[in-house]
Image (spheres, rainbow, N blue to C red):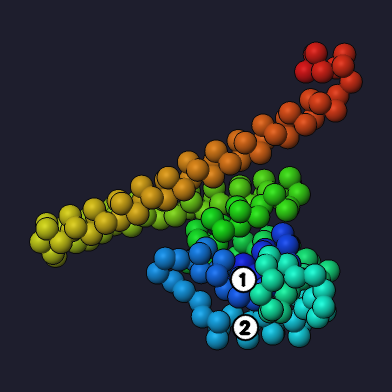
């Protein structure tokens, strides 16, 4: 996640290390925090891997005049950004959080890639909802005779709440997909010759 945050920020602009720490904590907060002691070693590893580089000393300061190392993304870093953005199989337990972050930088992808991410997340949400519904039915059957009704009600209420949260995610990403398709339709209409545009 932190690698994706760093690469995503540097895709937008060069940043000082301390500003990367601040923005990262703003993004993942309010309860989770990353320390400078964790992020700076990551920046060093990314620099050694050729994903980012440091603006040479004496270059014009970016985002303020505070003396600090300013990082920029390399071509290899751009490739890695694209690879991590399109990764839909890692960290599935945290994929909701990852997908929400990715939407802030999704405009840096091609339209077809954006649709692929939207479609995958729709499937992810639908699969999660189906799993929850199946498990709730199974628990209701298995626990109805073994545990008191209070326990079962509490468990099913909590699972139902999670299901409603995932349904809200599903509704949201469907809206994003519809916006993407509408933009694609508008662009294709604009590129048609005038006589075909009227028929379209």
The residue lying at 62 percent from left, 36 percent from top is: 179
- Labels 2 & 1 near each other (Cβ < 8 A): no
- Residue 181 sits above or below residue 129 on the image: above
The residue lying at 24 percent from left, 55 percent from top is: 156
- Per the image, the residue denoted by label 2 is 40
Q: Residues within 10 Å of mark 2 (few under 14, many from 20)?
A: some
- Residue 90, can we see it? no
- Residue 193 sits above or below residue 103 on the image: above
Q: Position of residue 12 (x, y in %)?
A: 72, 59
- Per the image, the residue denoted by label 1 is 20
Q: Position of residue 151 (x, y in %)?
A: 15, 61
The residue lying at 23 percent from left, 59 percent from top is: 155
Viewer-nearest residue: 63 or 24: 63
Q: Is residue 54 left or right of residue 41?
A: right
Mark identifier at residue 72: none
The residue lying at 80 percent from left, 13 percent from top is: 198
């Amino acid at each position: 996640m932190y690698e994706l945050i760093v690469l995503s920020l540097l895709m937008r602009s060069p940043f000082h290390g301390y500003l990367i720490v601040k923005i990262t904590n703003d993004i993942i907060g309010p309860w989770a925090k990353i320390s400078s002691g964790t992020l700076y070693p990551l920046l060093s590893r990314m620099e050694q891997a050729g994903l980012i580089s440091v603006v040479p000393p004496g270059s014009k300061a970016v985002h303020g005049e505070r003396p600090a190392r300013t990082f920029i993304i390399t071509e290899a870093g751009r490739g890695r950004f694209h690879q991590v953005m399109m990764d839909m199989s890692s960290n599935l337990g945290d994929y909701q959080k990852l997908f929400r972050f990715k939407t802030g930088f999704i405009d840096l992808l091609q339209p077809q890639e954006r649709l692929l991410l939207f479609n995958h997340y729709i499937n992810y949400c639908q699969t999660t909802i189906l799993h929850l519904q199946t498990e709730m039915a199974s628990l209701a059957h298995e626990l109805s005779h073994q545990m008191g009704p209070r326990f079962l009600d509490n468990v099913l209420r909590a699972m139902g709440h999670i299901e409603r949260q995932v349904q809200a995610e599903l509704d949201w990403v469907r809206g994003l997909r519809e916006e993407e398709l509408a933009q694609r339709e508008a662009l294709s209409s604009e590129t048609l010759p005038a006589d075909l545009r009227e028929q379209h």
